[in-house]
Structure formats: C-alpha cells, structure tokens
Image (cartoon, rainbow, N blue to C red):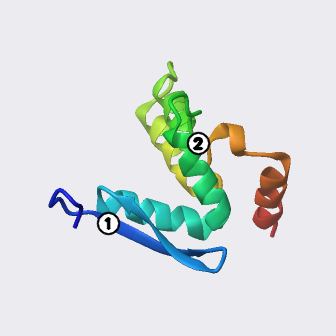
C-alpha cells in the first residue's frame, strides 16, 4: 500500500547484490515490467523505464508499430488485423524497447533466434 493509502504493486529484484523494488500504480504495469525484465534483463529494463520517464521519451517499437498500422490507408480490416498480430508475434523480444535503444546487436540476436 502506498503512503497515501492507495494500492501499489511492486516488482522485486536484485541489483548489485541488493534487493530493491520498482513501484507501479497498476498490476498491469507491474506485470509489464516483469515481462520486460524477463526479455531484456534487469539493467536494460531499468534503462528503458528511465528513458520512458523522461519528458521526451522515444516511442517503443510497439507504439511506433501501432501508429504505423493505424495510419495505413487502402488496406482491408483483415490486413490491419494481420499487421497487429504480426507486430505482437514476430517482434516479441523487441516490442517494448524504445526505438532509440534497439541496436545492431539487438536486431542480430532477434534474427538469429528466429532461424530454424
């Protein structure tokens, strides 16, 4: 519970050998943080969150992809649905990273993991 009596959700983790936590206003936000840590590791996840909290945080791949899909013209609703599904399914490891933090190594690792 927060100091003002509201319900908060904490994500516990170890950083430099010490237990610490991130506080989130919603369960969904806490679960998203846990998933991000699982995908990219704690240090990078904390960097991403810090980047997002800055005033001019760059969009994540998810945000950019959703914007891209929403602004397509001349395509059927089925095509838009497939674009959205592909965004979630094909870019799962990169989906929540800010575009500015997706580097050559991230893309190379993503490509290599997709190989049969």
- The quarter of the rendered structure image containing the C terminus is bottom right
Q: In this view of the protein, which residue sits in the foreground, 35 or 72?
A: 35
Q: Label 1's element?
A: strand
For disc 1, the neighbor class at 10 Å (few under 14, some 14 to 19, many from 20) is: some
Q: Label 2's element?
A: helix
Residue that appears at 56% across and 35% down: 59
In this figure, which residue is indicated by the disc labeled 1? 9
Task: Find the distance from the CA under tag 1 to the CA under tag 2.
Answer: 21 Å
Is 50 left or right of 44, judged from the image as shown? left
Residue 92 appears in the rendering: no
- Residue 5: quarter of image: bottom left
Is 32 left or right of 8, judged from the image as shown? right
In this figure, which residue is indicated by the disc labeled 2? 51
Q: Are marks 1 and 2 in contact (CB under 8 Å)?
A: no
Please, which residue is most extreme toward the left here? 5
Q: Position of residue 109 (x, y in %)?
A: 81, 60
For disc 2, the neighbor class at 10 Å (few under 14, some 14 to 19, many from 20) is: some
N-term mark: 1 or 2 = 1
Is 10 left or right of 46, judged from the image as shown? left
Q: Is residue 33 placed above or below 14 in the rendered structure?
A: above
Q: Position of residue 6 (x, y in %)?
A: 17, 59
């Amino acid at each position: 519970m927060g100091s003002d009596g509201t319900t908060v959700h904490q994500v516990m983790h170890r950083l430099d050998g010490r237990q610490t936590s991130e506080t989130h206003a919603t369960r969904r936000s806490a679960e998203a943080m846990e998933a991000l840590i699982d995908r990219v590791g704690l240090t990078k996840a904390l960097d991403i969150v810090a980047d997002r909290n800055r005033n001019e945080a760059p969009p994540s791949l998810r945000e950019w992809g959703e914007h891209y899909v929403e602004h397509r013209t001349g395509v059927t609703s089925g095509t838009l649905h497939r674009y959205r599904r592909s965004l979630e399914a094909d870019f799962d490891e990169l989906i929540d990273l800010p575009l500015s933090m997706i580097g050559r190594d991230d893309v190379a690792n993503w490509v290599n993991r997709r190989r049969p």
